[in-house]
Image (spheres, helix red, strand yellow):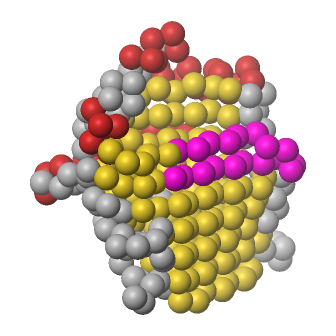
Amino acid sequence: MQRTTGKGALSMRVRANGQADKTQLHSLWQEGAAKIRLPKSYSSMAEAVLINTSGGLTGGDRLHWQAEAGDRARLCLTTQACEKLYRASAGTAQVTSELKAGENAQLHWLPQETIVYNSSALERSLQVQLAASAVFVGVEAFVLGRVHMGEAVKTAHLHDRWRIYREGQLIHAEELRLAGDIEAIIKGEALLAGNTAFATLLYVGPEDSEQLSARAYAIRQELGLATADKQMQAQTAVCALPNKIIARTLAKDGFTLRQKLLPLIAALRPGLSLPKCWSL
């Protein structure tokens, strides 16, 4: 059967002709089902929209994304819509993303939610290379079937892999694996506790541990979240670790997850509005 393939790559640089901190396109490559669009931005952060023109992913599909924010550049990457994982009759969809940020650059990875359908299969990886003073904000969210559409996910295979490096040193590694009886995973009290939607948010910056802890505390206070010693029982938790802040949230459905994500993303990106596609 015909399968989707595609590759998209872009790099952004700060223009050096007197307009300070004006991030502009340096190079762009796209082929197959992978397309990249650069809507006009009225903020100091450039925006790039990643598009899978096939409309979704199924077994055997292949997509590869690359993006670089050069020194002092500010780039936000998002998707045109939620990515949909359709039933896989054979094989596994594979998506790889490789990101890089230079000195004093800001790179924000804000794809919209991934919607998982019954019997779908996905292997996905995100690799980020950061300079010492770079800032990275990342979000990945999953919705296991659209509850209000009567969709239920009984079986699926999901493997989402993150590797974040600063100056070549690994500072964050994450492996999400959901496979087999998804209904049992959803019901498990130590797993999703009946929820069908969840997300992980990550902030990596040059601040020291004390500054990151203070910022995580401020976020919890601002959003009315549980204190650090009670987060195990909470559906949304924010904590600080060396080099990073991590937030995780659970929700009963995709709509509720979106309502939880918006203030969390805003708290990690103060002074910046959401990408335009998120509000459509």
Residue 277 falls inside the magenta stretch: no
Number of numbered labels in the structure image: 0
Residue closer to the observer: 125 or 201: 125
x%, y% of residue 56?
37, 73
x%, y% of residue 43?
56, 61
Residue 172 falls inside the magenta stretch: yes
Q: Splitting the image into 4 quarters, where does residue 21 fall?
A: bottom right
Q: Quadrant of the C terminus?
A: bottom left
x%, y% of residue 260?
35, 38
Image height of 218 relative to 147, above or below: above
Q: Splitting the image into 4 quarters, where does residue 226 fall?
A: top left
Image height of 141 relative to 90, above or below: above
Q: Splitting the image into 4 quarters, where does residue 203 fall?
A: top right
Residue at the image point whose x is 78% and y is 48% from the top: 165
Q: Does the image show residue 109?
A: yes
Q: In the drawing, does residue 154 fall left or right of residue 212?
A: left
x%, y% of residue 140?
49, 50
Q: Does the image show residue 279?
A: no
Q: In the drawing, does residue 138 fall left or right of residue 116?
A: right
Image height of 223 relative to 139, above or below: above
Tell me the magenta residue range: 159-176
Image height of 50 relative to 258, above or below: below
Residue at the image point whose x is 45% and y is 11% from the top: 230
Q: Main secondary structure of the magenta part?
A: strand
Residue at the image point whose x is 73% and y is 20% from the top: 210
Q: Quadrant of the N terminus?
A: bottom left
Residue at the image point whose x is 42% and y is 48% from the top: 179
